[in-house]
Amino acid sequence: MSGITIDLIKQLRDRTQASFADCKNVLEETNGDLEEAAKQLRVRGAAIAEKRGDREANAGIVDAYIHSNGKLGVLLDLRTETDFVAKTEEFRALAHDIALHIAAAAPRYIRADEIPDTDREDEKRLIMQQFAESGKPANVVEKIVEGKLASLAKDICLLEQAFVKDQGKTVQNVLDEAVAKFGEKVTVARFARMQVGE
C-alpha cells in the first residue's frame, strides 16, 4: 500500500464516510497527508453533487427527533434517488444527524434563495439605521450591509449553517459528502421545527 497504513485509511473514513477504496486512493495521491486527503474528498463530493443536481430525488425518508424534555421536535423530509439508498442505516443516520442539527441550530429556511424579499429589506433597513449616524461613507455602509446580509443567511439557512457535529463543515458539505458516498443525489426537501411556547 506504498506507506499508507490501514489505520490511516480508517481515520480518513471516520472523518469523511467515504469508501475504503476512495480513502486509500486519495491518501496515495496526497502522500498520506490526512488533512489534504479530507479536503480533496470534500471537493470531489461537491463536484459529484453538482453533476447529480438535476437528477430527481423522489425516494427518501421522514425522520423525527423529539428532545428528551418533550418540548422540542423536528420532522425532516430527506430525499435521495432510490429506495435502495433510503433504506440503508447510513442514510437513516444522516437524516437523524440533520434533524438533530435543525433542533439545535433552529434554521428558518433551507437555502438563502428562500428568504423572502420582505425579510431581506427589513434586515437591510435595520442595519442601515444602526450605521446612519456613524459618519461612515455610503459606499462603506453598503458593503457592511452586504456582509451582514450574507451573515444572516449563514445564521438562518440550513444548508449554509456550520454543522453542529463538525463546525468545520456546513450542512451542504455534509450533504455533498453523502452524495459522494451513496453515488446519488441527497437533498433536504423540507423540515418543520416545533418548540413549546415558540
Image: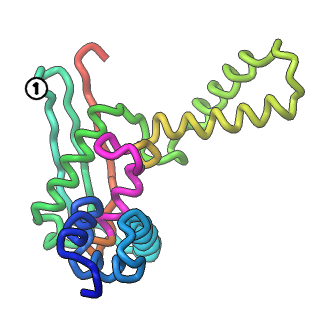
Query: 56 and 127: which one is in front?
Result: 127
x and y percent of residue 136 in the render?
A: 86, 23
x and y percent of residue 9 in the render?
A: 23, 72
Instruction: Give the colouring mode of the picture.
Output: rainbow
Query: 46 and 184: which one is in front?
Result: 46
Query: 189 and 141: which one is in front?
Result: 141
Can you say whether 84 is above or below 177 in the image? below
Write the residue at 71% across / 16% down: 130
Query: Which residues, given as a range, are shown in magenta?
Result: 163-179
As drawn, is 15 to the left or to the right of 35? left
Dot 1 crowding, Cα within 10 Å, few <14, some 14–19, many 20+:
few
Q: Quadrant of the C terminus?
A: top left
Can you say whether 48 is above or below 99 in the image? below
As drawn, is 51 to the left or to the right of 3? right
Residue designated by label 1: 68
Can you say whether 94 is above or below 3 in the image? above
x and y percent of residue 109 in the render?
A: 43, 40
As drawn, is 73 to the left or to the right of 113? left
Write the residue at 15% across / 70% down: 83
Write the residue at 66% across / 30% down: 121
Tell me if I can see residue 54 in this picture.
Answer: no
| Disc 1 element | loop
Write the residue at 63% across / 25% down: 122
Was residue 187 drawn as part of the magenta stretch in this picture? no
* Picture quadrant of residue 197: top left
